[in-house]
Image: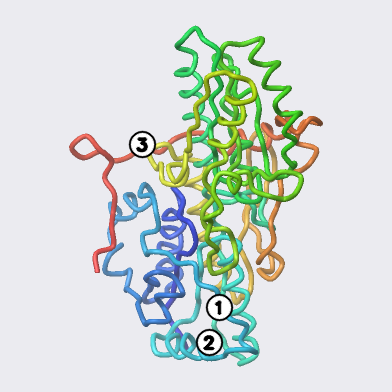
Amino acid sequence: MATNLLVGQSGGPTAVINASLAGVFESARAFGYEHVYGMQYGIEGLLEGRLVDLNDRLGDKMAIELLKRTPSSYLGSCRCKLPEFAVNEKPYKTLFDLFERHSIGAVLYIGGNDSMDTIAKLAAYGETKNSPIRFIGVPKTIDNDLMGTDHTPGYGSAAKYIATILKEVICDSSVYDLRSVTVAEIMGRHTGWLAAAASLSKGSDCAGPDIILLPERPFEEETFLKRVADLTAEHRSVIIAASEGVKNRDGVFLCDLVSTAGQLDAFGHKAILSGTSRYLADLIRVRLGCKTRAIEFSTLQRCASHLASRTDITEAYQVGGAAVEAAFNGQTGQMCGIVRLSDLPYRTATALTPVAQVANREKKVPDEWITPDGLHLTPEFERYARPLIQAELTPIYINGVPQHIHLDV
């Protein structure tokens, strides 16, 4: 009987993806798996036979605590799309031969939409071969666009960072007594969950952003400019939060109106989206004649572990552990998601969803959570998102900076 477990990380990293890895590792050891192996650079590295025995590296409590506080993907990542096995069976044979050589009884993959595609394909192939190996997906993405889960581990920390940094930008932009517009560009290729988090900067000491632009609504240039003009007539400083994935009514990314050099990744997604804030800032400067500034939050949104949400870290750890339990109990072809039980007090549980119902699908911001003019969020969004950014886990500081853990190979 196979006695070992294999885990990988894939896609863009988050501030808490390693907390899920910690949950997988500690639960796997608790359930009696002899060895927990990690894929180096995901499925792509595994196809080259690159794996590491995590028992040798995560064997003490300090390593686990550092792992929870370390951003990026400890095991390395990839964006590798497996072919349909009916078309090309070779990579599947390579992988299943490796599983057999290392006595792998369960394979867990921590990732987003495309990673769930990988798990779905492996589970389907295993079924055709009557394989006893269990394949389970562990959700991860700052984009919060996965079906089958109330929200994704990684989103809460990114949302906390966005709300915090935007609040600081709002303070900075109010220094001078002159009319100005600041456009903050926030990640989000096809969904606006991250840009929507900018609304969480609002509080008793901060008015929050004046406009929020989401991919869920087409960009209407004249409506937008009129609203900006009205705002600049009332306030000396105007703040706009814009998703990088905003498109016009013709379906063209605004960033492509600045540059058309975007590449596609292995899954056919636009790999680089940059320029939306510059486009909007230039548009406002030319049409309305006021001072503008463009700011790109960029990858800082996904790697700022010093601003991670403790709620997010806890849930990331929990879904990792629950995924191991599901595999141990014989489940396969499933993703372990989060179910919200109540908002106040905030309570959640984990639950399984067939991974085939998750792969290659995207969850949009509900239309009813967007204001009728398409330029802001309703209170329903705050009720949903505010609990996800609560509490902190203080970094372990050494010589004045946070200490992290790295995989030395």
Q: Of 348 and 406, which appears nearest the observer?
A: 406
The Cα atoms of the two marked residues, 2 and 1, are separated by: 9 Å
Q: Residue at x 56, y 67 (%)?
A: 115
Q: Nearer the viewer, mark 2 or mark 3?
A: 2
Q: Of 325 and 387, which appears nearest the observer?
A: 387
Place of residue 287 in the rendered image (x, y in percent of width and height, measured from the top left): 64, 25
Label ID, residue 394: 3
Q: Of 390 and 121, which appears nearest the observer?
A: 121
The Cα atoms of the two marked residues, 2 and 3, are separated by: 42 Å
The residue that mark 2 highlights is: 92
* Labels 2 & 1 near each other (Cβ < 8 A): yes
The Cα atoms of the two marked residues, 1 and 3, are separated by: 39 Å
Label ID, residue 167: none
The three-letter amino acid code for the residue at tag 2 is Tyr
The C terminus sits in image quarter: bottom left
Q: As displayed, is residue 153 above or below residue 129?
A: above
The residue that mark 1 highlights is: 82
The three-letter amino acid code for the residue at tag 1 is Leu
